[in-house]
């Protein structure tokens, strides 16, 4: 058996949990849950308080570090990256440790360290991550695009730079599977931006960044910023929509086979050449892919030439997808009825905190594009109405509503992923059992659990 399932691996952590939370563990149903990964952890133990005037030292946290490192060592030995756990006290006074293995069919939870989205269909991704760019007839480079001017300007700014050969450019095109636009070729003919060419000189790298207007990737590090390069958990990705306005310069996509990422703005946002522009854009425009968003990109410049020569300082991205008719929220602060959300274009319906009579889903039955439904526990008049939503690919419900569907054999078979919405204090084990019931319907790997007796 793996050492991650041995009590000796967990004993230091157990001592911390029991010593710090004896009263809470003694309460009926009391338990603590956490997660250990190779780079982080949740540990329900109090934060040490140093003496006034002294900063917190590593030594102050030594017990916690030691406890966590023992578990992390076991993870490394197994080739695993994380494990969840729960500590509770049995009726006879024994401490029980539950080691939870989510397996490949469950995403890690955000609020809970246990269950996130259940991946019912292997490899499935939400609809926005399947969306490809639309063809925009007549899209052309901007008048400002001038590869020759771009190359002359960069050679003046970087007279000693080492440029890429035509063979190296051809190798990059073969690796990417796309022909580089003329402006991008002109840039890399001046500098291939390899760290070894700068001999470890940070000042040389800064000169290139100043000359180009961004932290330039080496020719070998160019990549296609397609949807797969921008992963997002189902719990959030299914709640979003890809929308392109009729006059948008940039298509509202997660990613595109025509987005060639070539740099970074220094804050984690990627710069890319856009070969699949929106109806109001230009082929070869420079876009910014915001690392804090999962869909869309902002326009930085009409062309790479424009960016390098005119140095635009900012970028703009429209925010028009989180509103009816594509995405609708029914709650005490947004739409006041399901009827108000029921439009043919509706893709995502979220029902949140609600103070009135329970809601009926009848108005949205039969809508052709409805794919995501998220429901705050206790807000539906009849959960069995969900069976009429035959196009759902993602469904998030409270445990009681899932129980109704399971008992009636009415869980939609169109689902690719599902989520159990847990609100308030609920014991984790029934949630794990419920998750396994759903996974079993699709014959997916179940959540594993090992119970270790830690004594009194």
Image (cartoon, rainbow, N blue to C red):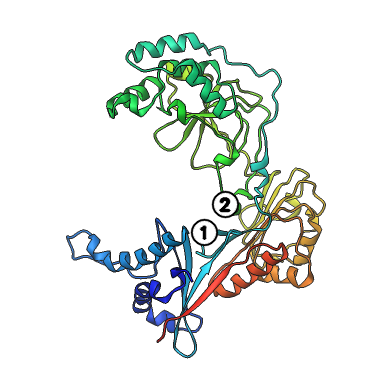
- The kind of secondary structure element at disc 2 is loop
Which residue does the numbered mark 1 point to in the structure image?
A: 110
- The kind of secondary structure element at disc 1 is loop
Does 113 sit above or below residue 248?
Answer: below
Q: Give the residue drawn at x 60%, y 20%.
A: 282
User: Which label's residue is closer to the chain start, 1 or 2?
Assistant: 1
Q: Nearer the viewer, residue 325 or 453?
A: 453
Q: Position of residue 40 (x, y in %)?
A: 40, 58
Whether residue 403 can be seen here? yes
Report the label total: 2
Which residue does the numbered mark 2 point to in the structure image?
A: 233
Q: Position of residue 131 (x, y in %)?
A: 67, 38
Residue density around tag 1, few if under 14, some if 14–19, many if 20 or more, within 10 Å: few
Does 386 sit above or below residue 148?
Answer: below
Q: Nearer the viewer, residue 410 or 167?
A: 167
Q: Position of residue 440 (x, y in %)?
A: 69, 66
Whether residue 277 can be seen here? no
Q: Which mark is residue 188?
A: none
Does 238 sit above or below residue 206?
Answer: below
Q: Residue furthest front?
A: 1
Q: Nearer the viewer, residue 210 or 59?
A: 59
Q: Give the residue drawn at x 39%, y 70%.
A: 44
Decide if residue 387 is on the left or right side of residue 455: right
Gap in Å between the C-alphas at discs 1 and 2?
10 Å
Q: Position of residue 154 (x, y in %)?
A: 40, 14
């Amino acid at each position: 058996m793996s050492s991650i399932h041995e009590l000796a691996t967990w004993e230091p952590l157990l001592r911390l949990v029991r010593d710090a939370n004896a009263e809470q563990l003694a309460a009926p149903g009391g338990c603590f849950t956490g997660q250990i990964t190779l780079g982080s952890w949740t540990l329900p133990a109090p934060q040490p308080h140093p003496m006034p005037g002294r900063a917190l030292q590593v030594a102050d946290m030594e017990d916690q570090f030691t406890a966590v490192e023992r578990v992390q060592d076991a993870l490394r030995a197994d080739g695993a990256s994380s494990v969840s756990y729960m500590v509770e006290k049995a009726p006879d006074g024994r401490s029980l440790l539950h080691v939870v293995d989510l397996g490949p069919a469950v995403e890690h939870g955000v609020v809970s360290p246990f269950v996130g989205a259940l991946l019912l269909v292997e490899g499935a991704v939400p609809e926005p991550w399947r969306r490809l760019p639309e063809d925009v007839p007549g899209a052309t480079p901007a008048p400002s695009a001038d590869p020759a001017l771009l190359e002359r300007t960069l050679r003046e700014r970087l007279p000693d730079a080492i440029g890429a050969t035509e063979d190296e450019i051809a190798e990059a095109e073969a690796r990417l599977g796309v022909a580089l636009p003329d402006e991008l070729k002109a840039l890399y003919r001046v500098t291939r931006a390899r760290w070894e060419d700068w001999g470890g000189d940070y000042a040389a790298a800064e000169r290139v960044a100043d000359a180009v207007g961004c932290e330039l990737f080496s020719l070998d590090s160019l990549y296609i910023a397609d949807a797969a390069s921008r992963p997002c958990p189902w719990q959030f990705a299914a709640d979003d929509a890809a929308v392109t306005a009729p006059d948008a310069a940039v298509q509202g996509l997660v990613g595109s086979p025509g987005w060639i990422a070539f740099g970074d703005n220094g804050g984690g946002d990627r710069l890319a050449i856009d070969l699949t522009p929106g109806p109001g854009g230009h082929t070869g425009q420079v876009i910014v892919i915001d690392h804090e968003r999962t869909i869309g990109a902002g326009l930085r410049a009409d062309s790479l030439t424009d960016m390098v020569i005119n140095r635009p300082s900012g970028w703009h991205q429209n925010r028009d997808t989180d509103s009816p008719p594509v995405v609708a929220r029914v709650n005490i602060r947004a739409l006041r009825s399901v009827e108000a959300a029921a439009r043919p274009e509706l893709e995502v319906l979220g029902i949140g905190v609600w103070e009135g009579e329970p809601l009926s889903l009848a108005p949205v039955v039969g809508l052709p594009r409805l794919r995501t439904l998220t429901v705050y526990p206790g807000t539906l008049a009849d959960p069995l109405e969900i069976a009429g939503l035959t196009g759902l690919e993602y469904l998030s419900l409270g445990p009681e509503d899932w129980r109704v569907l399971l008992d009636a054999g009415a869980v939609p078979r169109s689902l690719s992923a599902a989520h159990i919405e847990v609100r308030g204090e609920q014991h984790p084990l029934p949630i794990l059992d419920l998750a396994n019931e759903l996974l079993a319907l699709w014959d997916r790997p179940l959540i594993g659990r090992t119970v270790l007796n830690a004594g009194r």
